[in-house]
Image: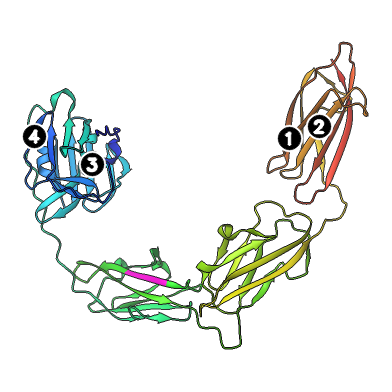
Amino acid sequence: MILTLPRVLAAALITTTLILTGSPQTVFAQPVTVQLNGQALYLSPAPIVREGRVFVPLRGVFEHMGASVVYSAGTINATKQNTTVQLRIGSTQATVNGQSQTLDVAPFIIGASTYVPLRFVAQAFGAVVGWDQATRVVTINMPNGGPAVPPPPVRPPPPPPPASMVYLRAQQPPPGARVQSGFVTVSAQFSHRVNPGSVRVRLDGNDVTPRSDITPSGFSYTSRAPLLLGSHDVRVAGHDAGGVGFERSWSFTVFGAPVPPGQSVQLRNQQPSPGSNVRDRFATISAEFTYNVDAGSLSIYLDGNNVTNRSATSSTRFSYKPPAPLDYGSHKVRVTGRSGGRGTFDRSWSFNVIRSGPAEIHLTISQPVPGGAVNRSFTIAGNTVSRGHVKVTIGATPSYTGLYNGTADAGPAGNFRLEVTLFAPPGLQAISLKISASDPASSQTAEKTMQVRVK
């Protein structure tokens, strides 16, 4: 099967990924052959198949495709005619003619050879790439038959940077430790002095450097909120006093304390409180747990409906914000899950949503004016409560509304507008308009009537 890949210069130059048919993990028993404009390329070293993608040595590909290459400090700049691409070893960020692009795989180095994913290299220079599963042949067809003059040789990549002697010691929590408290202080000492301004601290992939205390000899970070139950990864990177980079990491686990004998997980600080009456139909529903729970085991139900996926949960509490106004009447909240000691719990409470007072919402009509004259096509505009529902009926008299019926929803600022076209008998001289608005949150309403002349 032959795949023709779209021209995405963005992913250019060094990282061209040929996604092969079949599983992403396929490893071919026979070597892969590359053909350029029908001629086989003898690449040394040979192409490599990694994670279902064909990678080729940088030197051979660029030389045969007619691109000039400059390599310096891990950065590759390649130019062919009007196309200039820049990439970095180990990075998925690239620029094509100055425009930033994101690659799905990054170039890498094995020994003295730099490998690039084939598809993006070929696409960068306008080639069409194909893959023959049966023969394991990659075909590259360059426009106009390929380059006229071979490019200059690519400079070999520099040797890898020296390894830093900095390692971590006295880590807290210790590597592989299991701790009960979610409020953890993460710290470590450096075996050699480092440049504190270069140090970056990440907890579970999140950069916590601004909230960490960092010195040449160590660092410390205290979580402001309880960590979730489960494994947590600490990663520290920077440069030592000599400017050599380092990156170190370790992991620890937070587990819930077992519930004391004779005790069980209960709810506290429920909102709305049990048995309370609330008028806010968008009230946030939340509660805290008396003991740490397994956040991944929680299930939240509102009136029998599972709202867990729309809730914020942790080992100590949960909260849920209704996306639509709650109905008037009683509502039941139910929470189930497992405690830190792996026991189960099932808790619930109820509250009521009641109607507000009978006060009307505001309704202002700016078009048309009462007693004014309108054409048989005209505009009704005004202002009411934010996102209010507006209904308009028109008739020859206030009690007859058969000439027009329409609705509209006001915007966030309460503004609304309807375009009206009347289908009325000849000779009609006056009409009666009834305009009403309702608040979806409180169900309060307002109504205006007026008469206008028909031109």
Among the 4 quarters of the image, the one containing residue 217: bottom left
Disc number placed over residue 16 in the picture, else none: 3
Residue position marked by numbered label 1 in the rendering: 408
Residue at x 23%, y 39% (from the top left corner)? 119
Among the 4 quarters of the image, the one containing residue 357: bottom right
Q: Is residue 127 left or right of residue 263?
A: left
Q: CB of mark 2 within 8 Å of CB of mark 1?
A: yes
Q: CB of mark 4 within 8 Å of CB of mark 3?
A: no
Q: Earlier in the sequence, mark 1 or mark 4?
A: 4
**Tag nearer the camera, 1 or 4:** 4
Q: Is residue 241 left or right of residue 438?
A: left
Residue 38 locus on image (x, y percent)? 11, 29
The quadrant of the picture occupied by the C terminus is top right
Amino acid, disc 1: Ala
**Tag nearer the camera, 3 or 1:** 3
Q: Main secondary structure of the magenta part?
A: strand
Instruction: Let me know if residue 305 appears in the view.
Output: yes
Amino acid, disc 2: Val
**Tag nearer the camera, 4 or 3:** 4
Residue density around tag 3, few if under 14, some if 14–19, many if 20 or more, within 10 Å: many
Gap between marks 4 and 3, in whole Å?
A: 19 Å
